[in-house]
Image (tube, rainbow, N blue to C red):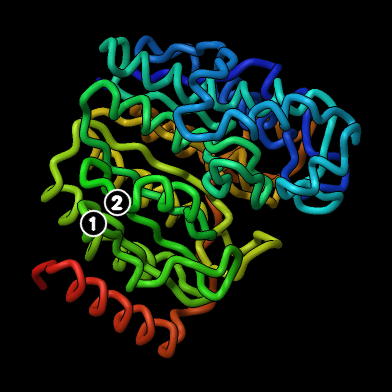
Amino acid sequence: MRQAIFLSSPDVWQRGHGENHPLKPERLQRTFELLCEYNAFNAPNVRVVSPRLATDDELALFHTRQYIEVVRSLNNDSNKKEGFRYGFDSADNPIFPDMFASESLKVGSALLGAELLIKQECDVAFSYSGGLHHSLPDRVSGFCVFNDAAVAIHWLLQQGLRVAYVDIDVHHGDGVQAAFYDNDQVLTISLHQVPLFPGSGYVDEIGVDKGKGYCVNVPLPPRTDDRTYLWAFNQVVPPLVERFKPDIVVTQLGVDTHYKDPLAGMNLTTNGQTNLFAALDKLAPKWLALGGGGYDISVVPRAWTLAFGVMSGQEFPEQLPTNYRAKYGGQWLWDKPLAESTLPQVRQRVEAVVAEVKKCHQIAS
C-alpha cells in the first residue's frame, strides 16, 4: 500500500485574498475537516505533516530576487504603487495582510512534499494549498503570487531527476510551461478549456530548443464532460508519460473543471474527476500532487477528499458524514450523473484536437 502524506496545518487557511475574492481559503479548511470526519488520517499508511515556509533562496529557484523583495514589502495595501508594476491590483490579485508568509508557506509545502518523496518517506504527497501555476518569475498572475509548482520542479531537477508535470486545472498552466519551455528534463502536459484565461495553451505551443516536443497542450472546448475528457486524457497523457520515463510525476489537481464552477464552463462531475485521479495514480512512480483552482465551495472539499482517497488507497462512504453535513450542508460525496449527454459538436471538436496533438507529438493511434 502506498505511503501517503497530506501537507496541512491551520496556517494554510488562516489568510486569504479577501472576503469577496473567489479563491477562498475556507475550501482548504473544509477539505481537511471532511477528511478528518472520514477518519482518513487514521489509516496506517497516512501521515499529516505541517508545511514550512520557503526560504528566499528556494523562491529564487524560479522568481527574481527583486520580485521576492517587492512581495515582502507589500502588506495590507502599503507600497501599492510599487505593487502595480508587478501585477498586483484590487481585483484578481489584491495585496492582503501577511501575504508574503501566506504564499511562501504554499511553496514550502510543495518543497517539503518533494523532499519527503526523495527521502523515501512516502510514495505520494498532497500539498493541496498550492498548484499556483500562473505566477511568473517577476509577476503575480491569476491569483498566484509564487509558483510553487515551478519552484518544486526546479528543486527536483537539482536532485538530478526527470519530471513529468500534468495539469488538469481548467485554466492553462502557463507559468509552469514558460518555466521549462526550453528544457528536455521536464515534460509539461496541460489539459484546459479554451477560450479562457490566460489565453494560451494551444497545440502548436510545443517548446523551443532542447525543450521542443516536451511541452504538450490539449485545449478543450466548453461543455466537455466526464467521458470525453477522460477519453482525451487517456489518448494523450499515458503514452507520453510512459515514453518520457520520469522519476517523479508532479500534478496540478485544479477541480474547476466541475460543472458547478462559476469561473469556467466544463461539464465534469466528481465521478469523472476521480477517474482522472485514478489514471494519474497509475502513471506516477513517485507522485507530488498539488492543489489548484476550484471556486465552488461545495465541490472542492469533496473532489480533493476523493483525490486523497485514491492516493492513500481508501474508499469513503457515499453519504457525507453527519457532522460535516450539519455544519456545511450537502448530502453526497459523489455527484449524481448529469442527465445531459455528450454534445456531438463537443465530441467532434475534442477528437479533432486529440488528432492534432497526436500528430504533433508522434503518438501512435
| Earlier-in-chain disc, 1 versus 2 | 2
Name the kind of residue labelled 2 in the image: Asp
Residue at far bottom of view? 345
Q: Residue at x 52, y 46 (%)?
A: 133
Q: Which mark is residue 267?
A: none
Q: Position of residue 44 (x, y in %)?
A: 37, 9
Element type at mark 1: helix
Q: Quadrant of the C terminus?
A: bottom left
Q: Residue at x 80, y 48 (%)?
A: 84
Number of marks in the image? 2
Q: Residue at x 53, y 26 (%)?
A: 59
Residue linked to disc 2: 182
Q: Position of residue 359 (x, y in %)?
A: 17, 76
Q: Which mark is residue 209?
A: 1
Q: Is residue 211 visible?
A: yes
Element type at mark 2: loop
Q: Quadrant of residue 229?
A: bottom left
Q: Is residue 305 visible?
A: no
Q: Does the CB distance between marks 1 and 2 fall below 8 Å? A: yes
Name the kind of residue labelled 1 in the image: Asp
In the rendered view, would you say 304 is above or below 120?
Answer: below
